[in-house]
Image: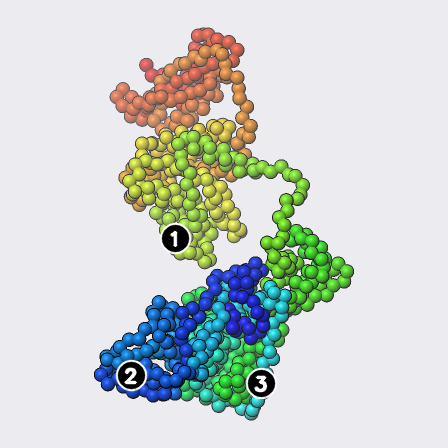
Amino acid sequence: MLLPLTWMKDYLNIDISSKEIADKVTLTGSHVESVIDLSVGLEKIIVSKILKIEKHPDADKLSIVTLDYGSGEIDVITGAKNMKEGDFVAFAQVGAKLPNGLEIKPIKLVGIESPGMLCSYEELGYSKSLVPKNSQDGIIILEEGNPGTPITEVLELTMPIIEFEITPNRPDCLSIVGMSREVAATFKDKIEVPEFEIKNEEDDIKNYFKDVVIESEDCYRYMGKVVKDVVIKESPQWLKNRLMQSGMRPINNIVDITNFVLLELGQPIHAFDLDTIKSKEIHIKKPSGEIKFTTLDNEERTLTSDDLVIYDKDEPAAIAGVMGGLDSDVKDNTKTIFIESASFSPDSVRDTSKRLNLRTEASARYEKGVPVEFAEIAINRVCNLIEITNSGTVVAGQFDIGEKESKKVEVNFNYNKINELLGTSLSKDEIISYLEDLEFVVNSNGEDVNVKVPFFRTDISIVEDIAEEVGRLYGFHNITPMPLRGDLLSGRKSERRQVEDRIKHILYGCGLFEIMTYSFISKKSYAKASIEYNPEESIELINPLGEDFSVMRTTTLTNILDVLEKNSKNKIPSMKVYELANTFLKDSKGEYGETKKIGFGMYGDVDFYSLKEVVETLLKELGIKNTSYVALTDNATYHPGRAAKIYIDDVKIGEIGEISFGLAKNYDITSRVYIGELDLIKIMPYIVKDILMEEISKYPTVERDIAIVIDRDLETDVLEKFMIENGSELLKSVELFDVYMGGNIEKDKKSSAYKLKFQSKDRTLREEEISEIMKNILSKLEDKFNAQLRS
């Protein structure tokens, strides 16, 4: 938001430097982005009047211009074409040094000396986009001036422009009056906004316009007035100055007045050429379906039933709160105008502006909310300026449909609450004084305070808002930092967070590195990973960043595979990673939920048992027993026979395995890849918080090896558990160390060799009791699994 201090002076007459204003207003919460001084380099540039224009005798493209520069007459050579005798121009005298660094010296142009030059707006430091129509592609043509007057006075550049960063919660600051009010409050002053009086109204609006009808709740208020005998012309210089200093290009007097009021009050205004509104009726409604509409920027846009449109009864004339139509624009031959001043739903304007990718000064204000009271103030100001500039005659009467006042907001509190929130010791009178500086109406009764919030402060609703207003005017930098007060509590991580820390520590010890990926993925990721996508369980985003981030993940595996693929393509020879992350699901009732999962992934010098070892180590370190593995053969993600489901007792907690060959092609990974996923929530009940250490037995272990012939499909996990269960308390472990299939073994059989370790806590084991246990194990293996001791 640009605040020209010369414009601010119209409402706030303070004699304070721009630096002090910038510094103190920043401390009260309105951050200053920059201070712009356009007067630098304009010291020797003065207003001059063109007395005579003659062609250069030896150059067709040059002219000799005789100027009255206040101290006499002087001849200057120029190539400009946008001038005529009687025009006021900007004359740079010899010795002037322009903002672009050009130093003015006497120079001969085709044999004739030119003691100075005529300047364009761009040479004075203005952006080309701000140059008025009559000064484009040429020199500055001023609407008024006295020869010899410094150009800084005519262009009102004697004071700098302050650029403010306006936060979204302060739409009232998106205007000159709003920012002037902030400056006034900072320096304990008051702004003076004059009454916008319309001195002369003629005729009756009913003779020019029939009706205004609101047909949508997204239009809160709509006002309309008519101006006849309109004269389209250049705006006076003071009006142009205000617009250019605020970042707007002057167009013509009517358009400039509507833009002036938008900047001055923060209320968007639109002027229709009344002759183009054929029905003489305005209807504010939403289309019944898609329609095509050409806006002021000559772009055809598609409007839908979600967009609020200003209709010429049945034909669209403007997009409410965003932009007018090309056909109804004010033109050079316009004689009668219909002025619109309205208040629309911020959500409606925001949605339309975003969908059409069309953001304007009007939409930027409507999106944040424009109080309905401004509609009347602004429309009167427009008519007031039309009279001041002799741009037309205001027709008596007006249309005013909808709400006339915003909902009144009052906040009641005990003034001590303000000190509690701020950590200050301000008196009640001081608090009231700060609030009254901001134009709040304050009533007090003892320690209780009632605050009536002005309509333009739409961001105030609770006592904390009031405390913030008091705090920023008092100065947050003046508040002495205080130590925190409160009861001492034992701060510690939750049980699950402690478990997560343990898991990360264990996995890091296993050689895995943690990764972190987005919770948003693409629907295509499921197909790529051969995982079935279930829309009834998945949570799709309403407003995603793009298709690649359109759904919440239900598994970590797609992300892990993406990470492995990227590193493989980058020639990383091996990788072991894990991710401990949330996944998201929607249940049968449509309610959202999330669960924590541990995903694994590795490739390189690894195999299935490398990943299985990581999982077993993790579960063991967490104190979990009774785990089992069941072959997984019906999952397209994994290679059949090289994958397993993992159980604790009868509860499935996850899966691990090698990805299928087809999946490997999808991810363009040449190495064999092993992935898996565990459900932390299902694991949690089995985790042992405090693992008790057992004393190591001082007696030696006894080892026995056996090789048994069993069915080829019999899983070793089943056998190991069976032997442990039937080996008495002396059997401490069973470890598979060899599997043989081939000659001397039937085709549907295999030979599995196990190492059994026995140990006692209180004695040395004897050969007889070990032999008895082994005999019992072999007997039960034969009975249960038809196992035969291999000779």
Q: Which residue is mark 2?
A: 63
Q: Which residue is mark 1?
A: 548
Mark 1 crowd level (few <14, some 14–19, many ≥20, 10 Å Cα): few
> CB atoms at circles 1 and 2 under 8 Å apart?
no
Please indicate, yes or no, whether residue 401 appears anywhere in the rendered image. no
Q: Could you say which is closer to the camera, residue 413 or residue 241?
A: 241
Secondary structure beneath disc 1? helix
Above or below: residue 383 compared with residue 768: below
The answer to whether one can see residue 471 in this image is yes
Q: Looking at the image, which residue is at 37% across and 76% down? A: 92
Q: Could you give the CA–CA distance between mark 1 and mark 2, rounded to whole angstroms?
A: 63 Å
Q: Position of residue 511 (x, y in %)?
A: 39, 32
**Disc 3 element:** loop
> Which marked residue is nearer to the observer: mark 1 or mark 2?
2
Q: Amino acid at mark 3?
A: Ile
Report helix, strand or loop for mark 2.
strand
- The residue that mark 3 highlights is 198
Residue 578 picture location, percent across and down = 41, 38
From this view, report whether residue 482 is shown above or below residue 444: above
Q: Tell me the residue at 71%/63% (across/down).
A: 450
Q: Amino acid at mark 1?
A: Asp
Comparing 325 with 101, the one in front is: 101
Q: Where is 790 relative to 385, above or below?
A: above
Residue farthest along the front direction in this orientation = 71
